Image (cartoon, rainbow, N blue to C red):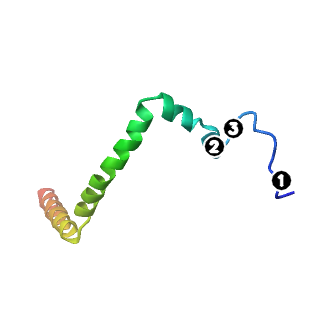
Amino acid sequence: MADEKLSRKMVFPYTFTAKAVQFPFKLHFNNHWMFPWFIGAAVLVSPVFYLIQKAANCEANVKLWAEKRRKEEEHHKHKWD
């Protein structure tokens, strides 16, 4: 029984997974200009985002921002005393 594939399709795909499985990806990829361009743009931009993320979370930058936050907090603390 577990080896047999179900022959019936759901009348309406209720779950997100069922909707994703039944989505006509090939139709959209072949007939809409935005779908392939979106995938291509994501591939081209992902290395740039990776480098920005890597630079923003480097140890030196984290220490720099911690120092800036400490100074700002100290300034606000003295402002209200």
In the image, residue 53 sits, relative to residue 29, either above or below, namely: below
Q: Position of residue 45 (x, y in %)?
A: 31, 48
* Amino acid type at image mark 2: Val
Determine the image quadrant of residue 78: bottom left
The disc at residue 21 is 2
Q: Is the residue marked by circle 3 packed among few (<14), some (14-19), or many (20+) residues within 10 Å?
A: few
Q: Nearer the viewer, mark 2 or mark 1?
A: 1
Q: Earlier in the sequence, mark 3 or mark 1?
A: 1
Q: Position of residue 24 (x, y in %)?
A: 59, 35
Q: Position of residue 11 (x, y in %)?
A: 75, 33
> SS of the residue at dot 3?
loop
Does the residue at mark 2 contact the one at mark 3 (Cβ under 8 Å)?
Answer: yes
Left/right of residue 68 with respect to residue 11 in the rendered view: left
* Amino acid type at image mark 3: Pro
The residue tagged 1 is 4
Does the residue at mark 2 contact the one at mark 1 (Cβ under 8 Å)?
Answer: no
Q: Nearer the viewer, mark 3 or mark 1?
A: 1
* Amino acid type at image mark 1: Glu
Count of numbered marks:
3
